[in-house]
Amino acid sequence: MTKIDPQKKIPILLGSGFAENLSNNYNLNERQNFGNDLETIKKIKTKTFFLELEKNKILFPQVKEKKPSNGNWLIKSFRSYGGTKVHFLRKSQFLEEQSYFQKFIKGESVSVQFSVKNTKVNIIGVCDQFILKSKKKYFMGKALITKKISHNFFIKIFDLTSQIAKIFSLEGLNSLDVILKGEKIFLLEVNPRPGLSAKIIHFNNKNFLEKKTTLKHLNKKTFFSTVIIYANKEIKIDQKKFMFLKKLSLSGEFSEIPNLGDIIGVDEPICLLHLKSKNIDFLEKTMIKKESQFLNKLAES
């Protein structure tokens, strides 16, 4: 940043991966920031987060610092993003620095995107979240697909996001990861920065910063998806592969393509695939088909 903008005039908005790994001595206040400050981000990424949830009687899966003796538990890092550094606890494992044990709850995984401007909360996306296990046994965020929701659920999720926004003094773009089990909503994580859902937010309501997103916006007839395409083997982005990827990105279906010379390891993301359809079954089949075609053509290029 210092090399790109030595005069510190360019506004910033931290994205997924950057917010979680930002150095403590980096001063965000030196630039105009459209998101949360470093103090807020760090508060959410420490055990203080769970203490605040408990104090405010917000439901979340049980967490421990001491290794559990039985049951299904996860080991999670406070620096986790996109499912990285999250995996099932094995008998021989112990906690690493900045990690914790969390009780595994089987249920429906949902991501809720929201913005906060001058303390006013705007729900801008609700998506089903699809997770897969990598070869390294990590959980990886695979895809988001817009979710049709009831008025009752909208009220519940609005109340939860409003409470979270107030507790942590959130600003800008944020999201919640929750697990739905019966009538209960368990809060897993708060992500105090934009992530995988950027295109979905734009699809729901292009003017979300100025115009409130309604239930009608969220329940559009068309389903929209964003899929992370992961490498199934190590890939070096040479000139031929880069030109193939660059051409694909012009279609509007692919984004976040790698740079020339990048080396992408197994289970690391290559790019994003964006699709839409009025039929969710057709959409899910198209996601699988297009991903397979992409990986085959990339290997051949």
Image: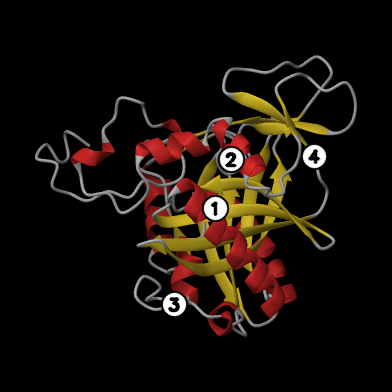
Q: Earlier in the sequence, mark 2 or mark 1?
A: 2
Which numbered disc, 2 or 4, marks the residue closer to the eye?
Answer: 2
Q: Earlier in the sequence, mark 3 or mark 2?
A: 2
Amino acid type of the residue that numbered disc 4 sits on in the rendered structure: Phe
Which residue is tagged 4? Answer: 104
Q: Residue 137, position in %: x, y?
A: 73, 32
- Height in image: 38 above or below 218? above
Which residue is tagged 1? Answer: 164
Residue pictured at 37% horizontal, 47% vertical: 36
- Height in image: 177 above or below 223? above
Residues under labels 3 and 2: Cα distance? 28 Å
Q: Residue 79, position in %: x, y?
A: 53, 32
- Height in image: 209 above or below 100? below
Residues under labels 1 and 4: Cα distance? 22 Å
Which residue is tagged 3? Answer: 212
Q: Are marks 4 and 3 in contact (CB under 8 Å)?
A: no
Which residue is tagged 2? Answer: 52
The quarter of the rendered structure image containing the N terminus is: top left
Q: Earlier in the sequence, mark 2 or mark 4?
A: 2
Q: How is the image coloured?
A: secondary structure
Looking at the rendering, which quadrant does residue 95 occupy? Answer: top right
Please tell me how crowded label 2 is: few (under 14), some (14-19), or many (20+) other residues with Cα within 10 Å.
Answer: some
User: Considering depth in this image, is 217 or 278 the residue closer to the camera?
Assistant: 217
